[in-house]
Amino acid sequence: MESSPEREPPATVEGGDAGSDAGSADSQNVDVLISDEVAALQELALRGSWRTIIEKVSQARSFSLLRYPHEHLVYLTFNAIALTKLRRFTEAMEDIESSVENLDSPSYRYEAFPNIYPNRKGSMVPFSLRWIHALLPTFLKSPDSLDRLYLLLNFVRSRIDAEKDDDSSSRGRVWRRREELVIGTIISIHSSQKEFGVCLNLLRYLLNRDRHNPYLLSKLGYVQLQFGDLDEARISFNLAEKLILEKKESSVEDLNLVGRNKALLYMVGKDYVSSIREYDQCIERDASDAVAINNKALCLMYLRDLTDSIKVLENSLERVPTAALNEMLVVNLCSILFNSSIFLLTLYDYYNEHFHGIQRISDCGICGVEYAKF
Amino acid sequence: MSGNVGGGGAGGGSHSLAFRVMRLCRPSLHVETPLKFDPADLLVGEDLFDDPTAADRLPSLLSSLSHSSDSSSPDLNFRSRFLLPDPSDATGLSGLLVLPQSFGAIYLGETFCSYISINNSSSFEVRDVVIKAEIQTERQRVLLLDTTKTPVETIRAGGRYDFIVEHDVKELGAHTLVCTALYNDGDGERKYLPQFFKFIVANPISVRTKVRVVKDLTFLEACIENHTKANLFMDQVEFQPAQHWRATVLAADKHHAENKLSSDAEIFKPPILIRSGGGIHNFLYLLKSFSQESKQTRIEGSNILGKLQITWRTNLGEPGRLQTQQILGSLYYSVLFANSVPTRCQKAGMPSYRHTGFLCKVSGEGLNKEDALEYSDRLHLGTIISHFAPHIIPKPWPVPRKEIDLQVVKIPQVIVLHKPFEVQLSLANQTDRTLGPFEIWFSGDANGERAFMVNGLQTMALPEVRAFSSSDLNMNLIATKVGVQKITGITVFDSVEKKTYEPLPELEIFVDSD
């Protein structure tokens, strides 16, 4: 690879301060902390180029291209994320465990490198590294994730209490957002284990702090729907709708949330026609609303309209493949196709994020229905 | 993977048609933790926002980095699969629905719903298709679909005819969904295709009830146990009382709900969710009889209390409904008394009221000693009783008639821990000869579990009791444990005949703390 320059070139946007030497970094110069290389990794992630990320990290490590201690951690985090996205969970876990023994070690603090980071204090660990380390056991079918996540929650809460910051400070906002992130992750695991009582309590905690959040209220409604409390789910959805309609300006996302929730209630009442009508409005507002597309297809199925159901799903995979490429949507499609006796030849690598366009494979010619390999 | 059930029993020869059956219960909401990130958690150290200057500049820096420079079709960039829009998305609850992935278990009280597809896999058209679908059980056949009157004219090569059937499951055990098609195949031959899809219906819940009577109040405790593989949300559990009875449900939680802030109560009512595979929930009802007569008389033989009607729900409100059989009260008694002296009684559900000189017969149905002993473990009932009538607990009628009988005449309303209290007993001689003198003591406490002590002489003496008469004695006791406790082991020894009796196996008391 090219040799790295002595001077840190200026990173993006903020004009003014040019980059300084590694040796005498201006502590106020934030640009040092988001180098071009790191920005490049971000760009690759935005494109879903996980394999490239893994290559870059591997090269950077082999050729010792990383200059700053904090960069090692950022690269490690990207590597773990890329491996996880490619479902290489064991490798991701091994990489983290072999690279860092203890994330709370003083060697991961700016104070350990006063030459490089004068006047900077605190931990240089990217928070996502902690998060993914806590989440990985779930993918490895180990029950450790919940323990790690609850410990992580304690960690986050200790950072909030420590300095009595309120929501107006950006520091306070950042840590509160992280608290919500960790609680949300905990809810997802409890939900998948059908532990709905805990989910309700955790959602109540979040709602107590953020009463007017229609998205949180919708999540509450989904949990209530899932275990069958239709009356309470209706109340939750109605509250969410009220909050959104009261807004001066509702985004497409807001309106689609209301529409999808309404459609769910119609579906629960077996009024599939009205449900489809709501979903159609959502799709009109946003053609990439994968949830609306998927759920509309299911309604068609319950209306005995298998053909249209399949059409809706296949069209979405063709028109908006990135949005629609969702494992469960494909699973639903397979269920419906299998039921209609169409012999499936499809092989798909759902987690192959390098999307190079659709190839069509025709089936045995029974019904002339084609479907995609992707 | 799609919940298809393989059918069996296709007729001889090859068929152009085949049935495929997919269970169509309600879908589920999919949960999946999203692998999405906020750049502030990824690109910089977690404590960077401690630095106020950095904190000022980072947000705009991060957001500019997040905007892809890719100007091609918005769908082809993966931003939405990488960036976490809102922390609430981490819950993984997107509202995406998933079809049932397996046939699953079918339970009594549910509705069996199925998508049935008949497919023509031959290269020829089939005509005049008469399709029938019915459910067969041991006891009956239920027709779900019959196109005899309007046969399907044609199903083209590679074509399909679909239908959805529903059936309320009201029987246990083996069920068979029989699908038959009578059709003209490509050669004009009339063919008959039967296919059978078997499934077993199991019992989803079991209901155990206990009845307990305190004075003129009847308590019904119902325990519902969940035998299914899913958590059951108890949508409605209603007790429908029989004629002359009125029921109110007693719920300990009501108190808490009233103390909550109104906005909380708006959103959060704690749901009754019974865990899968053995979870239980108890319901408590207070039943009052409002027949014309006062509490002093009851109607003989009317021991039907009513029925429990249960509606539960699972994913997306999939309902199930069951009703119990008539629940019998344990009371079957005729009592006629003027000055009733409430006496201490023992076994749950079997009251006895002593009238001067006239003891009433009481029998209970369906209860045994174990039930009574279990009762004191139920905190619910123990607490309730303490509010109403701490000193009244039913007792069995001694059958067969015993030679001596020991009854409790008087016991204090309130018994306080570590404070002596007096129990007045009456020993009745039910033979035709004089018995006694007697010695009375409490038999050994081998396990040291006894909840009381005798205050005073450990052995009490009682002089002779003449035929068919009774004699009173007082015992002074001290309670050593709080709550519902038992006084056990009263032993009466006839010192002349050298006979030992245990006429009062146990006595229940309620001890307050001091």
Image: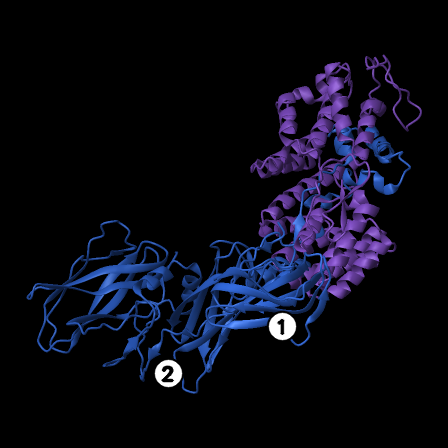
Chain colours: A purple, B blue
Could you say which is closer to the camera, residue B18 or residue B444? Answer: B18
- Direction left: furthest residue: B496
In the image, residue B242 above or below residue A141: below
In the image, residue B302 above or below residue B319: below
Q: Label 1 is placed on what type of residue?
A: Asp
Between the C-alphas of marks 2 and 1, the distance is 55 Å
Give the foreground label among 2 and 1: 1
Q: Position of residue B34 (x, y in %)?
A: 71, 41
Q: Position of residue B271 (x, y in %)?
A: 58, 59
Residue occupying image coordinates x 89% and y 27%? A12
Residue topped by disc 1:
B146
- Direction front: furthest residue: B187
Callout 1 environment at 10 Å: few (<14), some (14 to 19), or many (20+)? some
- Numbered badge on residue A63: none
Task: Answer left or right for A102 relative to B430.
Answer: right
- Direction bottom: furthest residue: B292
Could you say which is closer to the camera, residue B124 or residue B311? Answer: B124
Task: Answer left or right for B421 relative to B46.
Answer: left
Residue topped by disc 2:
B298
Q: Position of residue A209 (x, y in %)?
A: 71, 48
- Lower position in the chain sequence, tag 2 or tag 1: 1
Judging from the image, mark 2 belongs to the subunit labelled B
In the image, residue B91 above or below residue B510: above
Q: Label 2 is placed on what type of residue?
A: Arg
Could you say which is closer to the camera, residue A296 or residue A44? Answer: A296
> Which of the image's four quarters has the C terminus of chain B?
bottom left
Circle 2 SS class: loop
Q: Position of residue A40 (x, y in %)?
A: 83, 26
Judging from the image, mark 1 belongs to the subunit labelled B
